[in-house]
Image (cartoon, rainbow, N blue to C red):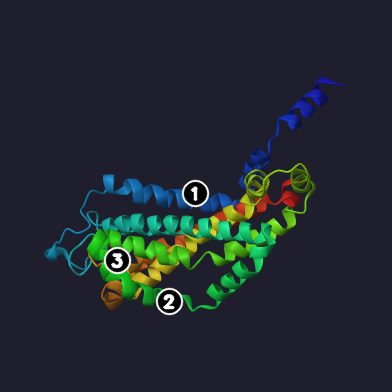
Amino acid sequence: MTDQTAGEVVTKAQRTLWGDVLRQFLQHKGGVAGSIIFLFILGAVLFGPFIHTIDPQFLDIRNKNLGPTWGHPMGTDNLGRDMLAQVLSGGRVSLAVGIAAMALSLLVGTLIGIIAGFFQKLDGPLMRTTDLFLALPILPLLLVIIMLFRDSLRSVFGPEMGIFFLIVFVIGITSWMNTARIVRGEVLAIKEREFVLAARSVGTHSWKIVARHIFPNVLSPVMVSATLGIANAIITESSLSFLGLGFPSDFPTWGRLLFDGANFMTLNPARVIWPGLAISLTVLSVNYIGDGIRDALDPRIRGR
């Protein structure tokens, strides 16, 4: 065996699963481009206010409805508030809602999917419950829940945190169904594999099998659902805010900025262009990241 051949054997032996996944993801142009855009947006909303230090709620009536200037790169609104500062501040809230609602949705969907797929007696009731939630008209249901509980939660947690908890809860609790069905399908296939049957044959407890063998093997669809869940949560929050049922007017989100700027589209189109562009780029980049993760986790593509 030559030195070159020996080196190739050692290199192949040192390859790991997640290393292969990362290499495959880096070959996905859309996933890489989406990651760059999403990281840029995330960095801008987190660190932008330390660079662009204008208070998003500062009123400058003498400079209202301005176009882009050096002092106000995105212009100002009808009250003279800086649009760039509001977009950066609103991005923090929108992304926080998206990530928190996605986490709640994944937790509920993964748990129900694993239980339904692994425990046959619970499969029927849990899947019928999932079908029931899928049949519900989500947007009217969200509107009813928010109208019923908004004031009580505001009085307990404050006007901002109360509506934040409510929106995260209603989005997360109404968007777990697709994750549950995907995870259930994966569990039904995995629980018939040899390593699971071997664990059962030696008397391993069911929950240990779930923790050690089932859950690690369903991470792939869960990770893809996570990226798509962020996009769906941001769109849903923006829709609620656009309808005037989201955060208060002095607590900007991208959807709220669209709602406030809709009446000034002819006077100042930038009022809706900038928050709309932020929503579109974020959702598009997250979807591309999800596509890249899906392809990277596909063993048929990764093995090429």
Q: Is residue 57 found left or right of 185 in the rendered image? A: left
Q: Are marks 3 and 2 in contact (CB under 8 Å)?
A: no
Observer-side mark, 2 or 1, equals 2
Q: Which residue is mark 1?
A: 36
The percent position of residue 278, horizontal first and vertical second, equals 40, 61
Q: Nearer the viewer, residue 22 or 266?
A: 22
- Within-10-Å neighbours for mark 2: few <14, some 14–19, many 20+: few
Amino acid carrying mark 3 in the image: Phe
Amino acid carrying mark 1 in the image: Ile
Q: CA distance from mark 3 to mark 2?
A: 18 Å
Amino acid carrying mark 2 in the image: Leu
The percent position of residue 208, horizontal first and vertical second, equals 64, 44
Q: CA distance from mark 2 to mark 1?
A: 36 Å
Q: Nearer the viewer, residue 165 or 281?
A: 165
The N terminus sits in image quarter: top right
Element type where label 2 sits in the image: helix
Q: Nearer the viewer, residue 260 or 250?
A: 250
Q: Nearer the viewer, residue 147 or 14?
A: 147
Q: Is residue 295 above or below residue 280?
A: above
Q: Residue furthest right?
A: 1
The percent position of residue 212, horizontal first and vertical second, equals 65, 43
- Within-10-Å neighbours for mark 1: few <14, some 14–19, many 20+: some
Q: Which residue is mark 2?
A: 141
- Within-10-Å neighbours for mark 3: few <14, some 14–19, many 20+: many
Q: Which residue is mark 3?
A: 247
Q: Residue at x 61, y 69 (%)?
A: 125
